[in-house]
Every structure is written in C-alpha cells, then in structure tokens.
Amino acid sequence: MAFSLDKQGISVSEIHRNASPAFLYEAALKFEKGSTISSTGALIAYSGKKTGRSPTDKRVVDEPEVRDDVWWGNVNIKLDPQSFVINRERAIDYLNTRERLYVIDGYAGWDPKFQLKIRVVCARAYHALFMYNMLIRPTKEELATFGEPDYVIFNAGGFPANRHTAGMTSTTSVDLSFARREFVILGTEYAGEMKKGVFTIMNYLMPKQGVLSMHCSATQARDGADSSILFGLSGTGKTTLSADPKRLLIGDDEHCWTDTGIFNIEGGCYAKVIKLSKEQEPDIWNSLQFGAVLENVVYEGTSHLVDYDNTSITENTRGSYILDTIPNAKLPALGSHPKNVIFLTADAFGVLPPVSKLSPAQAMYHYISGYTAKVAGTEVGVKDPEPTFSPCFGGPFLVWHPTKYAEMLAEKLRKHGAQTWLVNTGWSGGSYGTGSRIKLKYTRAIIDAIHSGALASVPTQEDPVFGLAVPTSCPEVPVELLQPRATWADKGAYDEKAKKVAQLFRDNFKKYEAQASAEVRSGGPKG
C-alpha cells in the first residue's frame, strides 16, 4: 500500500516505510559512502564530522503550553517558535531533495498505558536501521493500524542549520517542539540525537502523569523475585553491568517507574564498544551480529575484523542492537518495583569507596549531584581528572527542574522500601595516572552481593570525609579495597584529594540548595 508524507509537506516519490534490516543494509551499502559489513555481520556506518551529541545546540521551543514547566537554562535553551518553523522548513526542503527517504514507525515505552507512537523520517538507511533497533518494533498487525504518530522526528542531519537564524549558535541544531509534537535535526548525522530526543520527550510527558522517567539500566532476578535499577553517566558501566548473565535484562539505558513497577522505554541497546572484548562483555560482543549497527569504528580492510581499541575516529564508538539478541533479555521489558537502586560513578580521583550504603538523605543528595570524574584529556600538561556533575545522572535530557525528579524518586524509595547504593567503578590506590581502575570482576562481585542480599546486613564504617556507610566486607572482594584511604601509599595525598572532591560536591550543590530540603542538604560530605 502506498505511503505518503503529504501532511508533513514531503513529496518524495520513493519512500521506504518500515523496511526490513536486510533492505536497509542493501541501501546503506549502495548509497552511503563508507558503509560496509563487519566480520560478525553488523552494519558499519559513519556519522561524519559529529561523532557524539551536540548538547549546546539543543533547543526547546518556548511555547505557552510548556513555558511554566521547563527548566530553562543551559540544558533547555529557549527557541522562538518562528525559528523552529524556519528550521523545520529547511529540514523539509532538504528531505524533498533526496531521491529516497526512509520512515520508521515504532513505540517508546513497553507499558501500553504510557506508550508513545514515534515516526522517524530520515534520508539515511543507517539512521532508519538504528531507530528500527532502538524503538519498540510493532507487529504487522500494529503497523497496519498505526495511524498518526504522537511525535515525528525529521532527521535532516546531512544539511546544516542557517547560522543567521535567530537562536542558532552553529550549523547544528536539534529542536524540540512539544506543542507541534515534532523534533527537527539539522547539521549532525550522529544517530544518538534521535534516541535521546525520544528520551527527552518522555522526560517531559511522564512526570505529568506521575511517572518517574530515569536514565538508568534495569535488571530482574531470574525467578522474578526482585528488580534493580542502575543509574550512571556514560563510561560508568551502566550497560556493562546490566548485561549480567545471572539476571534478566530489562534494558540498558532508559526506564520509567510507575505505580505498578518499571518499564523500558526502548526496544534495543546502544552500547559503547571502546575496548570491547568477548571475555569481559560476552553478551554485547555476541549481539553485534546481523541487524546491529556499529558506529564510527575502525576495521581491518581484508577480514573486516573491528579494532575496538582504535580511537582514531572517536573514543565514542557505539553499537546498536535489538533487545532480542540478548539471551537473558526479559520481554516484554517490564519489571516489578526495584528492591535496590544503584548509583554508578567512575571516580578517577580514586577517593570514593567501591561501594557505600546510602541513607535516604544521601540518596537524594547524590541523585541530584550525579557525579563522575573522567580521565584527563589529551591536552599537554593536563593530568588531573575532570569532574562531571549531571543532575539525576542525566542532566542533558531533563526537561523539568532536577528537584522534581529527585522528589519523585524519594517518594518511590519510601513507598516501596528500596535500598540505595553508591558504587564506584573508577580508580583505587590513587588518582588516574597513579592508581589503577577497579577490576570489573570486583565490581561485578559487589553488584552480585547487593542483589543476593549479602551486603544488606554487613557492618559498615563511616567514611570520615563523605559520611558514607562503607561495608567492612564483601564476598569475592579484597577487604583492603573497600576502604579507599587504605589503598593509597601516600595517606596525606589521599586526605588532600578527598577534601578537594568533597568541596567539588559542595560547590556544585549550591545550584540546588534553594530548592532542596534540609534533609537533602544533610546528605552531602561532612564538614
């Protein structure tokens, strides 16, 4: 049956709606420069100049319907409705010049009560396959009655924004209009913009319905007895630790917590593949087969073996694959109320304990803080790690003020009796450059002990700087590793560094103090 986008002003004759992965492979290989197939069958594609998100180019349209709700500022930068219309028309004009377009229809949210219908219109087969993986795929019967979508993504990333349009600061623009229910991309072909656009939409709509949207992964016990959620910024291990063969995977990145439990927003996973190995992450490795997308990776020209250690294009190499390829995926991707809530941080300063048991006040404080510290960049002379604070472990995707999400999480924790933990997947024995990364096997053992309940009753010792309750033992983890100061050869250097990081927390939290309760403020570092 013929499919038309006339309502959107698009009149291209060759529109491929919900094409199969095989068709999209063929189209990418034929029409998109650089596309090829890896030795394991994944489609290798390149996003061009932009190999990551462009948060400073993200705009939310200032409309009466949402004006009083949005957390305006550096995360949600205002855009005039007229500028949005100009960018939209620019995108439509570009799409109309293409010989062929691709349309993907899918759902966001596994809970039918809160599910959104999403339509993606794009000019690259790679983008279509990516969103085929990342959205929840309708059945043939559902597609036949899909009707009009709730939101439309116009991906014209191959065409730049006009820098002279009011509100533009570069040739890249990622614009969201809640009133028009449209999302327009110009000047970037990085596929992750579409995925995070959907998440941003859900981050606005779900809290309006009393549902907490979260940047987290989620797993469930194989017997269904409990579920857990793991928050964390990129590089902290959120995807790696949720790919746990001992548990069922609900999802690796985006979830919602309702009055009945949790649900995954997505139909697939988008994993970082830098330094990927079959031994350390077998589920992710085995998922990069036919139908998966490998983004911006380097491969050997004859064998097409991917060199996962090669960062010559970007350190942000990625793999997109459907949930179904994970042997222990839980489908439908719904779970019970979490018993454990885990905050992941990769502390490259090496001062936070590998695991801490948080009080309710500390849980709120650390949720609003959203801390991690990345290793220093390549600039000459820069040796100290770079602290990152991202509220709710997902600052770039929030729409409401962070305290709204924090209050909702606090209410969920109280109502369902979940225990919150802070797990450091970063450095021990010193900062980056002196100490070493905590071994993945130890972090996995900590997560296992949380899930089994073994850590719940272990005696704790209070960290003198951060006030955290640190377990004195954990199965399969060396006792000396649990107390970070004990792992440093230079105790004075540890004390100095710990005080510095504690002050970083305090300085960051000043942005939220006015809206935070006395209880939440008490959850920070001591002193």
Image (cartoon, helix red, strand yellow):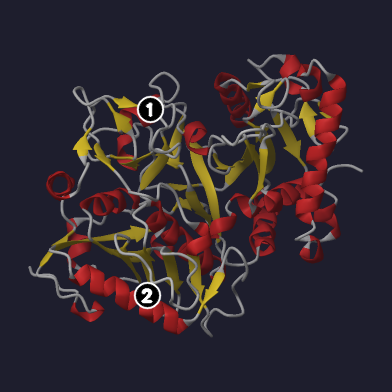
Q: Quadrant of residue 16?
A: bottom left
322 left or right of 205 in image: left
Q: Is residue 111 above or below residue 274?
A: below
Residue under the image location 66 percent in, 23 percent down: 433
Badge 1, how many Cα within 10 Å: few under 14, some, many 20+?
some
Which residue matches tag 2?
87
Q: Is residue 259 visible?
A: no
Q: Quadrant of residue 186?
A: bottom left
Which residue matches tag 1?
308
Q: What whole-number distance in Å separates the C-alpha atoms at marks 1 and 2?
A: 37 Å
**Kind of residue at disc 2:** Asn
The tag earlier along the polypeptide, 1 or 2, is 2
Residue under the image location 35 percent in, 52 percent down: 191
Q: In the displayed image of the protein, which residue is found farthest to the front?
A: 380
Residue 270: percent from the left, percent from the top?
40, 43
Residue under the image location 18 percent in, 47 percent down: 28
Q: Tag 1, which secondary structure?
A: loop
**Kind of residue at disc 1:** Tyr
Residue 189: percent from the left, percent from the top?
34, 54
Residue 10: percent from the left, percent from the top?
20, 75
80 left or right of 110 in image: right
